[in-house]
């Protein structure tokens, strides 16, 4: 199952809206088939692993990170494929909350006389599949907030200089992290200040996450995003007050537009994430800016924070990494638990998981 999980993790960022499932088929002491959900979400893991195993699948044990599907979707159900291949036993890590499956996959296998074991390494599988599971259960993608700041939490000097606070290794790590998410998300302020391309670069051929920009009025610069429309999808979340002209310009360039509710003169982050979830995203990597990050945090919509801290001091005149959150008491502050901490070149990386009450 550990092998199946590690296979599944390799598909992160490549298979949305589907979960990245891993499957390993074992005959005796020999691995005869192994696969993850294919790029784009199909074929599913099991059918590919079974094809690899061929006749050796008969009487074998299949280890699958997610309950095999039982529905006739765009592909025939994996539960039927496992039965047809004559597999003797199926070991599953996590259940599939998709209402078309939700236990029916396991029932189908048992009804065919296959021995089923569930819950093996379930917690690890639920961590790997967190984005897919959250989308199925709460209708929104998993949100990781990245913050790269000085030791004192600033992201630029008073004059706006921000290149570079963290070192090249940390920036490379960020590119690798982008590739493992379905989408990268930034606010309009960051687009105006940094003119980022938001593509994954310098790592060889990599999946390109959808580039999502939250901009209430669609007043975006004609910069690198507009110049790289062919390199990765561009989705723009805007408010009802974005002018018709601006909407048309971006639509003609190939962007997909999402009209979102507006709250306190900002895009309502819950509405935005619900729409992105409905469009199929299971994970979003938010890279700022401060206003967008603060609105997501205030709304309790950040699941994980990835902090990169550089050994540089910028003082109170520097730009803070987060905008105002409207907090009145410490008890209202969103809190996170440290789950990983490591040095990346001269910088420090911390991964924090939100505390759910
Ligand atoms: C599996 N193995 O590798 C994956 C599964 O649109 P479809 O027909 O591809 O079905 C998508 C659903 O299939 C998805 O919501 C989830 O329930 C399941 N994904 N199932 O047995 C896989 N990726
Ligand atoms: Zn399937």
Image: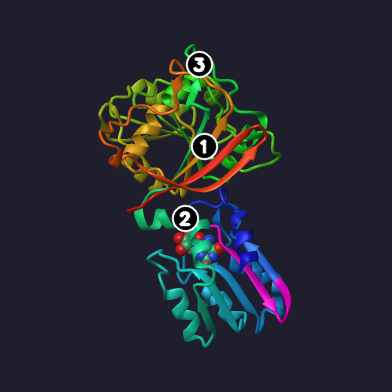
Residue 63, x across and y down, in percent = 60, 72
Q: Nearer the viewer, residue 60 or 339?
A: 339
Estimate the spatial distance between the alpha carbons at disc 3 and disc 2, rounded to whole Å: 36 Å
Estimate the spatial distance between the alpha carbons at disc 1 and disc 2, rounded to whole Å: 20 Å
Decide: few, some or many residues near mark 1? Use Cα within 10 Å; few <14, some 14-19, many ≥20.
some
Q: Earlier in the sequence, mark 1 or mark 2?
A: 2
Residue 242, quarter of picture: top left
Q: Is mark 1 within 8 Å of ligand 1?
A: no
Q: Is residue 102 left or right of residue 306?
A: left
The boundaries of the magenta stretch are: 20-32
Name the residue located 41 percent from the left edge and 63 percent from the top edge: 98
Decide: few, some or many residues near mark 3? Use Cα within 10 Å; few <14, some 14-19, many ≥20.
some
**Please, what secondary structure does the residue beneath circle 2 have?**
helix
- Quadrant of the snapshot with the N terminus: bottom right
23 is higher (above) or lower (below) than 187: below
* Residue matched to label 2: 130
Q: Is mark 3 within 8 Å of ligand 1?
A: no
* Residue matched to label 3: 157
* Residue matched to label 1: 307
- Please report contact status of discs 1 and 3: CB closer than 8 Å, yes or no: no
Residue 96, x across and y down, in percent = 45, 66
Decide: few, some or many residues near mark 2? Use Cα within 10 Å; few <14, some 14-19, many ≥20.
some
Q: Is residue 27 magenta?
A: yes
Q: Is residue 49 left or right of residue 274?
A: right
């Amino acid at each position: 199952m550990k092998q199946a999980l590690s296979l599944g993790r390799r598909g992160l960022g490549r298979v949305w809206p589907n979960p990245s499932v891993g499957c390993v088929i074992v005959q005796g002491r020999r691995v005869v088939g192994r696969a993850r959900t294919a790029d784009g979400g199909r074929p599913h893991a099991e059918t590919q692993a079974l094809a690899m195993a061929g006749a050796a699948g008969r009487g074998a044990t299949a280890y699958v990170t997610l309950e095999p599907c039982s529905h006739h979707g765009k592909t025939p159900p994996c539960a039927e494929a496992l039965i047809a291949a004559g597999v003797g036993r199926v070991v599953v890590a996590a259940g599939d909350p998709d209402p078309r499956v939700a236990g029916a996959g396991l029932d189908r296998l048992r009804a065919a006389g296959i021995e089923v074991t569930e819950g093996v390494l379930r917690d690890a599988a639920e961590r790997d599949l967190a984005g897919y599971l959250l989308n199925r259960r709460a209708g929104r993608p998993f949100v990781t907030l990245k913050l790269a700041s000085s030791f004192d939490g600033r992201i630029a000097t008073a004059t706006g200089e921000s290149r570079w606070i963290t070192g090249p290794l940390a920036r490379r790590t960020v590119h690798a992290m982008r590739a493992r998410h379905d989408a990268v998300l930034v606010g309009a302020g960051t687009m105006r200040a940094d003119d980022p391309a938001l593509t994954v670069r310098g790592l060889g051929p990599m999946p390109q996450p959808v580039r999502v920009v939250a901009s209430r009025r669609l007043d975006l610069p004609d910069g690198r995003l507009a110049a790289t429309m062919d390199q990765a999808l561009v989705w723009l979340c805007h408010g009802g007050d974005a002018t018709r002209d601006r909407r048309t310009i971006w639509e003609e360039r190939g962007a997909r537009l999402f009209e979102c509710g507006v709250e306190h003169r900002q895009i309502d982050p819950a509405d935005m994430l619900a729409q992105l979830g409905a469009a199929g995203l299971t994970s979003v990597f938010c890279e700022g800016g401060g206003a967008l990050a603060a609105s997501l945090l205030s709304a309790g919509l950040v699941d994980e924070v990835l902090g990169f801290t550089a050994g540089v001091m910028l003082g109170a005149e520097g730009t803070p990494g987060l905008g105002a959150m409207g907090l009145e008491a410490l008890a209202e502050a969103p809190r996170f638990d440290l789950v990983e901490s490591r040095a990346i070149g001269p910088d420090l990386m911390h991964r924090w998981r939100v505390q759910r009450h």
